[in-house]
Amino acid sequence: MGTAWRDATTEMVRCPSCMEMLEGCDCEELSSQLEKHMIESHGEEGFMQGARERIRGR
């Protein structure tokens, strides 16, 4: 691969649950990264449960 990865444009997406930034080279990689993150970090937590807790905490 050489040094081509240094010049590659990366995209970023924020986890809707914890706001952690995830990075990938394209939409497919971003989707995979977000899916992996959601399973590993939020597997037992429902998205709406986390959203309600954040809203109530404000």
Image: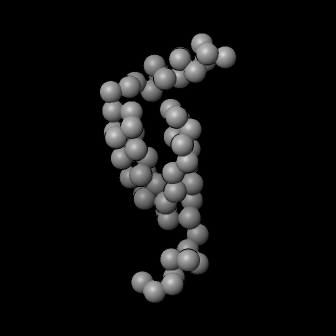
Residue 27 in the figure: left or right of residue 57: left
Q: Residue furthest bottom?
A: 2
Q: Is residue 5 visible?
A: yes
Percent of width and height locating residue 54: 58, 21
Which quarter of the figure is the N terminus placed in?
Answer: bottom left
Residue visible at 38% across and 52% down in the picture: 32
Percent of width and height locating residue 50: 49, 23
Residue visible at 39% across and 33% down in the picture: 42
Q: How many marks?
A: 0
Q: Is residue 27 visible?
A: no
Residue visible at 32% across and 27% down in the picture: 44
User: Depth check: 2 or 16 in front?
Assistant: 2
Residue 49 in the figure: left or right of residue 43: right
Which quarter of the figure is the C terminus placed in?
Answer: top right
The quarter of the displayed image where residue 28 is located: bottom left
Q: Is residue 17 above or below residue 46?
A: below
Q: Is residue 56 above or below residue 4?
A: above
Percent of width and height locating residue 17: 50, 32
Q: Residue furthest right?
A: 58
User: Depth check: 27 or 46 in front?
Assistant: 46
Percent of width and height locating residue 8: 55, 74
Q: Is residue 56 above or below residue 12?
A: above
